[in-house]
Amino acid sequence: MINLSVKIEAGDLYDYMLMHSYNSPAGVVGSAFGAILILFAIATRQWIFIVLGLVMLLYLPWTLFVKSRSQLLNNPAFQEPLQYILDEEGLTVSQGEAQEKMAWEDMHKAVSTGRSIILYTSRVNATIFPKRQLGDQRMSVIEMISTHMPPSKVKIRQ
């Protein structure tokens, strides 16, 4: 059993949103289209396309940055630390009097970024474990997730 107390910060939420958005089809297509516009501008010397390409490439990160700050300020769940228990049965999340238990078999996938380990509880909802807050429990968390989820659902880099 692993007990964790995690306080999500704006940077953690932004990191999750970037990873989630750029790994979606819309994020990939938007980035590719922005890059193509810039290449087209260079090839044809029609500089308006470089502006359009830059807008395409910078719009998503900027809006996600603003959204992460706004969510952190407006969502009461991010005001206090979340308590997590990872055990043989699954993940238990609690904050104050509220508590929710999720079984390992119900988890969608687990991934990592340079900043966090992200455990998707559905296609769009996730639990974020900032690596800097895991400390010496980081390897135990990775091992617990890897042991209880199918390898095809776990994409965690060390």
Image (cartoon, rainbow, N blue to C red):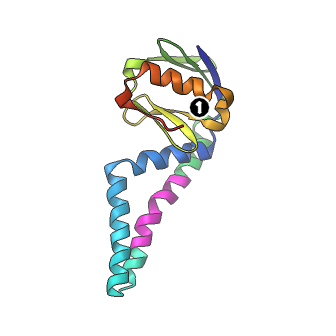
Closer to the camera, 129 or 78? 129
- Seen at 41% across and 22% down, the residue is 149
**60 displayed left or right of 70:** left
Q: Which residue is mark 1?
A: 77
The image position of residue 82, as x and y in percent, is 62, 26
What amino acid is at disc 1? Answer: Ala
Label 1: state its secondary structure: helix
> Is residue 80 shown to the viewer in this render?
no
Q: Quadrant of residue 154?
A: top left
Main SS class of the magenta portion in the image: helix
Vertical arrangement, residue 109 with respect to residue 57, above or below: above
Vertical arrangement, residue 137 with respect to residue 43, above or below: above
The image position of residue 113, as x and y in percent, is 52, 43
The image position of residue 144, as x and y in percent, is 51, 21
Closer to the camera, 131 or 49? 131
**81 displayed left or right of 16:** right
**Number of callouts in the render?**
1
Residue 83 among magenta residues: no
- Seen at 36% across and 87% down, the residue is 45
The image position of residue 143, as x and y in percent, is 52, 23
| Magenta span | 53-66
> Is residue 112 shown to the viewer in this render?
yes
